[in-house]
Image (cartoon, helix red, strand yellow):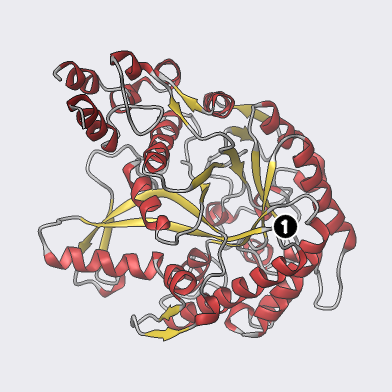
Amino acid sequence: MPRLYRKTAALADEGIIPTRQRPYLEDEMALAARYVFPEGFLWGTATAAHQVEGDNTANQWWAWEHAGRVFQKQTSGPGCGWWRGRWKEDFARAADAGHNAIRFSVEWSRIQPEPDRWDEDALERYRTWARTARQMGLEPLVTLHHFTDPLWLSEQGGWETSEAVARFRTFVERVASALREYVRLWATFNEPNIYAYRGYVEGAFPPGRTEDLAAAFTVLTHMAQAHAAAYEAIHRVQPDAQVGIVLHYRGMRPARPWFPPDRWIARLHHRWLNDFYYHALARGRLIGPGLRSQAAPELRGTLDYVGLNYYTEDQVRFTLRRSEVFGAHGFPAGAALSAHGEIAHVPAGLYRALRWANAFRVPIYITENGVDDPDDRLRPRYLLEHVHQVWRALINNWPVRGYLHWSLVDNFEWEWGWTRHFGLWACDPQTQRRTARPSAHLFAALAQNNGFDAALVDRYAPAARPVLFPAAGLDALRAT
């Protein structure tokens, strides 16, 4: 291998210099090349029914809100007005900005408001959304369960009961039959690991239980079984569909890598939060709270792709406090933080998350990535440096097929209500007025150009220039 090639390959492996393909640079001019993504790569945004539709009165989250369980006792109310018709203008915003994909979910409690009643008008409305998205040039990725359950299901025991598996399968068959003409990409569940953790361990989501690891494991197991049942049901209705699951990944790294207890507790927390569905769906094993394993071969291989949600990464320090499950979580020293300090800017964590997702041996879609930032001070840098990590994964030939930013517009952010701002477009829930943030224009440029160059970085996030186009790369090549 020529010396120049060896040097350039090493720099590209470390993400120091951009290159069109892995890598061969004939001269230093190649350092000015754009970060280029594969043809057909999906650029879009993600949303969830309860967070944007509004007026979802028949699910457990509406009841939870109106019991005063959300920050400042806020409620979702009319949401972002999607059920009242504003979905179409938001779809148009995305299409006009050059996006070629959009992720939205369907609300189970609208489609099946009672155990023995189906609302065909609601199904037709979602069918219209999917058809319109495709007509606008947006590939729809439809999520079938995004944290909300019909109130009647919750009253029957929810996902703690095995009957929920068959109920969900029936619901999925209805939806897939109605939308199959326009939807190719289906996600069965959004973040079932977070649904179980926040509902049964942390208590921030309904039903609000804490430290109930046994119930959390039961819920995780039933959702895994429901995923497999939905996978089979969709493929029976639509053989060419691509069916996946969306998993939240939060990196856990030892705060003191030299200290064995930190390494141990970081690995343990990683396994609890991140690894259940890897073992279930890639290996056909169910790993309980005591890390005991049982065979579940019927779950293995029920994935056509994996959806990856990544926001940040934790540093974990061993502690003797049982209330913290023997691990105190924090962020790397000096990391930039989101507006409310809940997300640290750790873009390399996305690369590590993609390496984890690659172990599933199926295509990967980044289905959520974003930051709470009402003033758009961090988001442009966050966006570009995380997209750069996606490029790093691609030059390793990891099968990343798309990047969906969270979110299209500000919306109702679960336990935080309207106090968190993730949208490319700001949305005032009182007036419903939309305002494009600078990052909306940045993301439009990414989507339209299928990549980015130094000029775009200088315009929107000059602080990222040393990371994305460092002088060190040029100096290294000059030294060859």
Circle 1 packing at 10 Å, graded few (<14), some (14-19), many (20+), is: many
Looking at the image, the residue that sits furthest to the left is 258
Q: Position of residue 215 (x, y in %)?
A: 49, 82
Q: Residue at x 72, y 63 (%)?
A: 239
Q: Quadrant of the C terminus?
A: top left
**Secondary element at image label 1:** loop
Q: Position of residue 174 (x, y in %)?
A: 80, 67
Q: Residue at x 34, y 80 (%)?
A: 291
The residue singled out by tag 1 in the image is: 106
Looking at the image, the residue that sits furthest to the front is 1
Q: Is residue 362 left or right of residue 103?
A: left
Please state the total of marks drawn on the protein image.
1
Question: Which of the pair 244/375 is nearer the observer?
Answer: 244
Q: Residue at x 18, y 18 (%)?
A: 475
Q: Quadrant of the N terminus?
A: top left
Q: Is residue 52 visible?
A: yes
Q: Is residue 169 left or right of residue 316?
A: right
Q: Is residue 37 left or right of residue 100?
A: left
Q: Position of residue 344 (x, y in %)?
A: 35, 44
Question: Which of the pair 290/479 is nearer the observer?
Answer: 479
Disc 1 residue type (three-letter): Val
The answer to whether 480 is drawn above or below residue 379 in the figure is above
Q: Position of residue 85 (x, y in %)?
A: 82, 42
Q: Residue at x 56, y 23 (%)?
A: 441
Quadrant of the image occupied by residue 26: top left
The answer to whether 431 is drawn above or below residue 212 in the figure is above
Looking at the image, the residue that sits furthest to the right is 121
Q: Is residue 410 visible?
A: no
